Every structure is written in structure tokens, then in C-alpha cells.
Image (cartoon, rainbow, N blue to C red):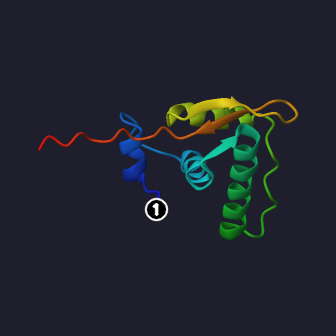
């Protein structure tokens, strides 16, 4: 599924602009179905590094910020992601998934 501004805007009503972080999180959840906060954070960081290396290869890579998980949690809430449960791994991060679209009733 191709992720575009329009498809994310339909998912998030009332939000005119969707940033790179939200798109990256949406892609991770779309591919994996469900993922923990730490998995999403590491994959988003990898996306950021790949983007930076592609567009400015001479600059040093951005260091991982300690508050990245907070930014990811905020973005997850903004796209309406649902908390499934807590993982059994160390630190017990939340596992997230995208909301399931409700089927449209056909009145024929």
C-alpha cells in the first residue's frame, strides 16, 4: 500500500500536515501489523539515518535522541494507533497496531 499525504489525511481527520515521522510509523505498522514502541523507535531512527545519508552524505549522522520514544508515542496517538498489550521483553514496552477500518454497510 502506497503511503501518501492524502491516505494519511483520510486516516487522521482534522490534521492538514503529516510529517515524516508519522509516515514512517504508519509504514512500520502497515508492514508488521503490530510492533512494540522500541521496535518502532529503532526502525524510525534507521529511516532518518537513511534519509540523511541520501540527501547529505558529507554531514555526520544525527545521534539518537533520548526523547525519541516520547515523540514516537505522541505520533502513534495522533494516528489513532491502538495499544494491544505489553511485550514480555525487558522494559515491557507497549505493542501497537493500526485501527481496523469498519466495513461499510451495503443497503441494497
Which residue occupies 59% across, 56% down?
31
The relative height of residue 15 versus residue 57 in the rendered view (above or below) is above
Q: Specify few, some or many for label 1: CA neighbours under 10 Å numbering under 14, 14-19, or 20 or more.
A: few
Task: Residue at the far right: name it.
Answer: 90
The quadrant holding residue 60 is bottom right
Q: In this view, does 40 lie to the left or right of 31?
A: right
Identify the residue under disc 1. 2
Residue 23 location, x and y as percent?
Answer: 54, 50
Residue 94 location, x and y as percent?
Answer: 71, 31
Which residue occupies 11% across, 44% down?
108
Q: In this view, does 103 lie to the left or right of 70?
A: left
Is residue 105 or residue 45 the one in the foreground?
Answer: 105
Which residue occupies 74% across, 59% down?
49
Is residue 66 or residue 25 the one in the foreground?
Answer: 25
Which residue occupies 70% across, 67% down?
56
The relative height of residue 91 versus residue 42 in the rendered view (above or below) is above
Residue 51 location, x and y as percent?
Answer: 66, 62
Residue 46 location, x and y as percent?
Answer: 74, 56
Amino acid at each position: 500500500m502506497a503511503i501518501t499525504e492524502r491516505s494519511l489525511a483520510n486516516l487522521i481527520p482534522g490534521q492538514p500536515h503529516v510529517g515524516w515521522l508519522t509516515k514512517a510509523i504508519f509504514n512500520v505498522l502497515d508492514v508488521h501489523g503490530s510492533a512494540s514502541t522500541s521496535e518502532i523507535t529503532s526502525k524510525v531512527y534507521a529511516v532518518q539515518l537513511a534519509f540523511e545519508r541520501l540527501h547529505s552524505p558529507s554531514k555526520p549522522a544525527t545521534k539518537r535522541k533520548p526523547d525519541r520514544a516520547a515523540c514516537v508515542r505522541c505520533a502513534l496517538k495522533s494516528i489513532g494507533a491502538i495499544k494491544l498489550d505489553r511485550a514480555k521483553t525487558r522494559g515491557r514496552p507497549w505493542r501497537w497496531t493500526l485501527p481496523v477500518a469498519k466495513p461499510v454497510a451495503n443497503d441494497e
